[in-house]
Amino acid sequence: MNRKVLVLNQDYSPISVCTVQRAFLLTFLRKTEMVESANGHVIRSVSQSYPMPAVIRLTRYIHIPYKGVALTRQNVFKRDNFNCQYCGTHNELTLDHVMPRSRGGKSSWDNLITACKRCNAFKGDYTPEEAGISLQYKPFRPSYVMFLRDYSGYHCDEWRPYLKVGK
């Protein structure tokens, strides 16, 4: 039971992802209500069966002051799909500053990418253009909803209406 459950605020805005066990407990304690069940899946106790939640909604509105994606090594790797942004490999990944720090480059979503050790060493203290290599795509800051939808590591059809997925 390694499925994930989308957690919505009372106004149906996505706020997080949790485990099925936590979602069931929150629903059982009436802190949330089940909005969508996992199609055909159930949770069984000794004497009863319950539908497995896929999307739950809080019964009380929670004010969340900042819903952004933290700039961390793992989140940059997730955004870049664990691929070197120069050659596409999955091996020996590191972070690379597109504009080198020694030349004024900052540690920001727009300047950090995933690179393998080989490409990072080849690029060195140059920009990609100066080193004669190109990025697969321009680095960007992912939105919170986009991060939940694309990088949470789990995709579920029941989540689509709440994450504005057009697929």
Image (spheres, rainbow, N blue to C red):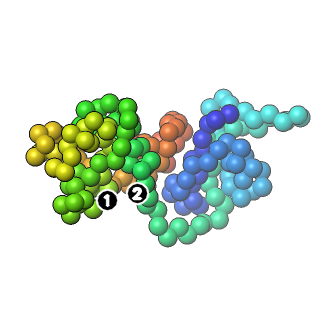
Residue identified by numbered label 1: 108
Residue 132, above or below 107: above
Q: Quadrant of residue 82?
A: top left
Residue plotted at (64% across, 58% down): 58
Residue situated in front as seen by the camera: 50 or 148: 148
- At a point 22% along the width and 55% down the height, the residue shown is 100
Residue under circle 2?
71
Q: Can residue 148 be seen in this view?
A: yes
Q: Crowdedness of circle 1 by 10 Å Cα count: few (<14), some, many (20+)?
A: some
Going by the image, does 18 lie left or right of 46?
A: left
Comparing 46 with 70, the one in front is: 70
Image x and y of residue 77, in percent: 39, 44
The count of marks equals 2
Which numbered disc covers residue 53?
Answer: none
- In this rendering, is residue 5 above or below 12? above
Query: 71 or 11, which lies in front?
Result: 71
- Under mark 1, the amino acid is Ser
Q: Which badge, 1 or 2, comes first in the chain's sequence?
A: 2
Pinpoint residue 85: horizontal percent, then vertical percent.
27, 39
Location of the N terminus (image quadrant): top right
Local secondary structure at mark 2: loop
Label 1: which secondary element: loop
At x 62% / y 32%, what residue is drawn?
39
Determine contact: label 1, label 2, CB under 8 Å: yes
Q: Is residue 19 left or right of residue 112?
A: right
> Is residue 79 something one can see in this rendering?
no
